[in-house]
Amino acid sequence: MTKRRAWTAAKKAAMLGKIRALCATFPKATERPSHGSPSWFIDGKKSFASVTDDHHGDGRFALWCAAPDGAMAMLVDSEPEHYFVPPYVAHLGWVGVHLDRAPWSSIASALEQAYLQRAPAKLAALVRAQNTND
């Protein structure tokens, strides 16, 4: 089991900065607070991710994000040290990612998949095209 790191406010801010920078690369992605947490939306409407810090005392520094059908159960079952079932949005298929445990590659992948899951086809195609050009 991967050990949870005790993160300082500076480390949390740095991780939030990395998340913000990645989300800023997605077409028409915007950030605004939702339910007291930094959250990202497509065209200001459809949410695709939120960062929570000790949500209702759960002790987690985490990302909640949209996931493709069946992905939440598969991720939680296969890597419970990195992923969890988030409250309130699990019934929508969203997955929780432990930001203080999961590697950046998993966090970045979860964010991109969340965006692709919620984006209109035209915007999703732009991200997919960018990935094939990289």
Image (tube, helix red, strand yellow):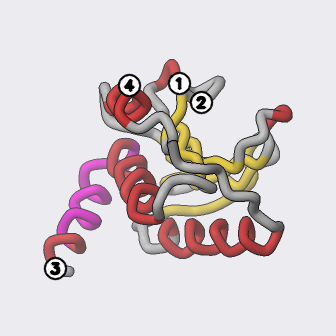
Query: Residue beneath label 2, please?
Result: 86
Pointer 1 or 4: first along the chain: 4
Asked if the residue at tag 1 contacts the one at tag 2, i.e. Cβ–Cβ closer than 8 Å, the answer is yes
Q: Is the residue 91 above or below the residue 36 in the image? A: above
Q: Amino acid at mark 3?
A: Asn
Residue 28 x, y percent position in the rendering = 46, 64
The local crowd at label 1, few if under 14, some if 14 to 19, many if 20 or more residues have their Cα within 10 Å, is some
Query: Residue beneath label 1, please?
Result: 90
Label 2 and label 1: CA atoms lie apart by 5 Å
Pointer 3 or 2: first along the chain: 2
Q: Nearer the viewer, residue 100 or 20?
A: 100
Pointer 3 or 4: first along the chain: 4
Is 123 part of what is drawn in magenta?
A: yes
Q: Nearer the viewer, residue 45 or 72?
A: 72
| Residue 27 visible in the snapshot | yes
Tell me the residue at 20%/80% (across/down): 134
| Element type at mark 1 | helix
Q: Main secondary structure of the magenta part?
A: helix
Q: Is the residue 131 above or below the residue 41 in the image? A: below
Residue 131 x, y percent position in the rendering = 22, 71
Label 3 and label 1: CA atoms lie apart by 33 Å
* Magenta segment boundaries in residue numbering: 118-129
Q: Amino acid at mark 4?
A: Ala
Tell me the residue at 22%/60% (across/down): 125
Query: Residue beneath label 4, please?
Result: 73
The local crowd at label 2, few if under 14, some if 14 to 19, many if 20 or more residues have their Cα within 10 Å, is some
Q: Amino acid at mark 2?
A: Pro
Residue 21 x, y percent position in the rendering = 54, 75
Front label number (3 vs 1): 1
Label 2 and label 4: CA atoms lie apart by 11 Å
Query: Residue beneath label 3, please?
Result: 133
